[in-house]
Image: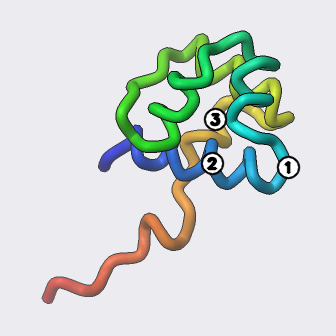
Amino acid sequence: MDWNAVVAANVRRLRIERGLTQERLAHEAELDLTYIGGIERNRRNPTVDVLGRIATVLGVAPGTLLEQSQASTSRPDCG
């Protein structure tokens, strides 16, 4: 399981749903803009503290950022 990819997809989806730019999310979470971009592109490995700060700005529980969507969990049968 690529947990960074799950977090990346969730951060991007939730940010867009809330009408936030990466810049606004970064500002409100007191993070660098390039760090947010790196998380969304699955290039960064955010700490628990960072996940908490992002989740607070997005108005969700931190665990929400680790929830797998149907699209990321559905795989063709291998047998």
Q: Residue 28 or 48: which is nearer the viewer?
A: 28
Please tell me which of labels 3 and 1 falls first in the chain: 1
User: Residue 4 occupies which quadrant of the picture?
Assistant: top left
**Which residue is pictured at 60% across the width and 49% down the height?**
10
Q: Which residue is mark 3?
A: 63
Q: Amino acid at mark 1?
A: Gly
Mark 2, secondary structure of its residue: helix
* Amino acid type of the residue that numbered disc 2 sits on in the rendered structure: Arg
- Label 3 sits on a secondary structure element that is helix
Q: Residues within 10 Å of mark 2 (few under 14, many from 20)?
A: some
Quadrant the C terminus occupies: bottom left
Q: Tell me the SS state at disc 1.
A: loop
| Above or below 75: residue 53 | above
Q: Nearer the viewer, residue 20 or 51?
A: 20
Q: 32 above or below 60?
A: above
Residue 76 coordinates in the image, percent (x, y): 29, 85
